[in-house]
Structure formats: C-alpha cells, structure tokens
Image (cartoon, rainbow, N blue to C red):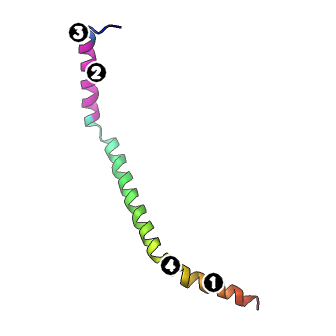
Amino acid sequence: MPFNSHSVRNLTRNVSAFARRFGQCESGATVIEYGLIVAMISVAITGTLLSIGQTIRDDVFTVVSNAMNNAGN
C-alpha cells in the first residue's frame, strides 16, 4: 500500500493523539512508583536479615539444637 498525503496525515494525527493520551495517563506512573516502593522495602528487609542472620543462627538455633540434644540424654 503506497503512502499518500492523506494516509500520512491520518498516521500523524493518530500518533499525535496517542502521544497526548499517553502523556496524560498516570496509571503507569503509579504502578512504577509502587514497584519502586516494594523494591526498596525488599532491599531493606534483605539487608536487615543479612545483618542479623549470623546472630540468629548462633544464638537461637544453637540454643534450640542444644536443647534437643540434651532432651535425648
């Protein structure tokens, strides 16, 4: 299908209308903002767990393991 001036005008008008609607739409921005918030929260949780993981393993699990070993005696 060859392009003529009428089809180019229609294409330009459609692209302009799409760009205008896309620029006014805020739902995508909201989804991105919520995604960034979730990402930051998960980074904070991961950092916290990594920093206290050694303490939890040494203190809590050692106590539980020793209690279970002593219960069999």
Whole-Å distance between the Cαs marked 2 and 1?
A: 68 Å
Above or below residue 60? Residue 12 is: above
- Residue 69 lies left or right of residue 16; in this view the side is right
Mark 2 vs 1: CB contact within 8 A: no
> Is disc 3 placed on a helix, strand or loop?
helix
The amino acid at mark 3 is: Ser
The segment highlighted magenta reads 8-22
The amino acid at mark 1 is: Val
Residue, x 25% and y 14% (percent of image)? Answer: 8
> Is disc 2 placed on a helix, strand or loop?
helix
Q: Which residue is mark 1?
A: 64
Whole-Å distance between the Cαs marked 4 and 2?
A: 59 Å
Q: Which residue is mark 3?
A: 5
> Is disc 1 placed on a helix, strand or loop?
helix
Residue, x 29% and y 34% (percent of image)? Answer: 22
Q: Which residue is mark 4?
A: 54
- Residue 14's disc number: 2
Marks 3 and 1, the one that precedes in the sequence: 3
